[in-house]
């Protein structure tokens, strides 16, 4: 029997502790970063970085559950960032299998289901962080174009520091919330789950998309380092001119005092 799994980007972050206290569902796994629940034949997976994934939920149930989660969301936005995948459940001892358009699972394999929903959520998170990275890249390119045309930066000291802070925050979020290259703990002693983990990373193209975001981050950081050097040089030159002017004032004052005397 075929079903759909779907992941949604709902917020900048979700209060995992608050959700755990409030939710009246069967908790299968939980820590400070994620909560995995079973609910009437379906599953819901909540992640601290603002993504929630569902399996076996209709649209009305998804809407009702997201309303339950909403009070614990910081930066609620329910953006259009979503991703779906078809899952076929088989009875018996079938092994997990991944094809281009769906995943085949034994219906009793909860850990495989958890793995699928986790990677589906990571894929949506990559879309979200890719959008942030592209936006920062575009803004940085505007500043470098201005530098090329005008020969000077269009960012002052405070604005440049704010821009640097924003870039650092995004890079920190990516490092904290995306664990694309790490194998999930459930795969360590199970060859079938390990194979499923690798296949999911491949069909969602997780590693390549993650590398692209990280490479953009390195480029942006190099540009910001150059901007900072230019700003420091500009501030140093300004300070030198202030010192020169003060010395000139002192010399003129001394010259005038000698003329008077």
Image (cartoon, rainbow, N blue to C red):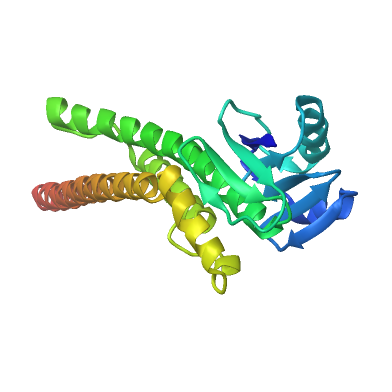
The total number of labels drawn is: 0
In terms of image quadrants, where is residue 9?
top right
Above or below residue 142? Residue 258 is below
User: Residue 61: x and y, percent?
Assistant: 81, 31
Q: Is residue 183 left or right of residue 21?
A: left
Q: Is residue 179 something one can see in this rendering? A: no
Q: Is residue 236 left or right of residue 189?
A: left
Look at 72% across and 50% down and name the residue there: 91
Above or below residue 32? Residue 8 is above
Q: Nearer the viewer, residue 101 or 53?
A: 101
The residue most toward the bottom is 189
Q: Is residue 221 left or right of residue 5?
A: left
Above or below residue 244? Residue 140 is above
Which quarter shows the N terminus? top right
User: Residue 37: x and y, percent?
Assistant: 78, 52
User: Residue 259: x and y, percent?
Assistant: 9, 48
User: Residue 163: x and y, percent?
Assistant: 40, 41
């Amino acid at each position: 029997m075929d079903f759909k799994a779907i992941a949604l980007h709902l917020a900048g972050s979700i209060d995992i502790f608050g959700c755990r206290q409030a939710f009246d569902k069967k908790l299968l796994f939980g820590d400070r970063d994620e909560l995995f629940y079973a609910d009437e034949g379906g599953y819901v997976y909540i992640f601290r970085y603002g993504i929630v994934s569902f399996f076996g939920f209709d649209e009305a149930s998804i809407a009702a559950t997201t309303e339950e989660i909403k009070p614990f969301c910081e930066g609620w936005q329910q953006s259009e960032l979503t991703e779906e995948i078809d899952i076929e459940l088989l009875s018996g001892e079938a092994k997990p299998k991944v094809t281009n358009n769906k995943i085949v699972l034994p219906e009793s394999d909860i850990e495989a289901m958890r793995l699928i929903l986790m990677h589906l959520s990571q894929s949506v998170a990559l879309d979200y962080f890719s959008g942030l990275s592209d936006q920062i890249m575009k803004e940085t390119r505007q500043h470098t174009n201005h530098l090329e045309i005008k020969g000077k930066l269009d960012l002052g000291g405070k604005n440049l520091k704010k821009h640097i802070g924003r870039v650092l925050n995004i890079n920190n979020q990516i490092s904290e919330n995306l664990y694309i290259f790490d194998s999930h703990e459930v795969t360590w002693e199970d060859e079938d789950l390990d194979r499923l983990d690798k296949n999911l990373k491949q069909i969602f193209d997780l590693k390549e998309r993650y590398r692209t975001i990280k490479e953009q981050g390195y480029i942006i950081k190099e540009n910001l380092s150059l901007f900072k050097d230019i700003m420091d040089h500009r501030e140093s030159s300004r300070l030198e001119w202030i010192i020169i002017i003060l010395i000139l004032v002192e010399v003129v004052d001394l010259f005038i005092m000698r003329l008077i005397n």
